[in-house]
Amino acid sequence: MRWIVCDPFRKGRARRQAYSWAAGRLGVTQPRLNDLLRGKADKFSLDALIGLSARAGLAVKLDIRKVA
């Protein structure tokens, strides 16, 4: 699940905004931003990734269904 939440950050990497500006906007350090952009989801808790997504203007939707 962490990988799914982390994936939009990886894909957005092509925009290449200044690391210091992006890190400041997300409230993380540049090394943490680098981990995020490289898809190292295992270094983040799910709560942290959801918080980062919200700060980046992304919506997270969780769909839980009963297995048939």
Image (tube, helix red, strand yellow):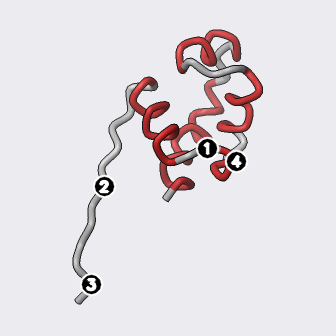
Residue at image mark 3: 67
Sequence-first disc among 3 and 2: 2
Separation of residues labelled 4 and 1 (CA atoms): 8 Å
Residue type, mark 3 in image = Val
Please tell me in which quadrant of the rendered image residue 14 appears.
top right
Residue at image mark 2: 62
Residue at image mark 4: 40
Q: Residue at x 43, y 39 (%)?
A: 50
Q: Secondary structure at mark 1?
A: loop
* Mark 2 Cα shell of 10 Å, populated few (<14), some (14-19), many (≥20): few
Kindly indicate whether the residue at mark 2 contacts the one at mark 3 (C-beta within 8 angstroms): no
Kindly indicate whether the residue at mark 2 contacts the one at mark 1 (C-beta within 8 angstroms): no
Q: Is residue 37 above or below residue 63?
A: above
Residue type, mark 1 in image = Phe
Q: Residue at x 45, y 25 (%)?
A: 56
Residue at image mark 1: 44
Q: Is residue 11 above or below residue 42?
A: above
Badge nearest the viewer, 4 or 1: 1
Q: Residue at x 56, y 18 (%)?
A: 27
Q: How many marks?
A: 4
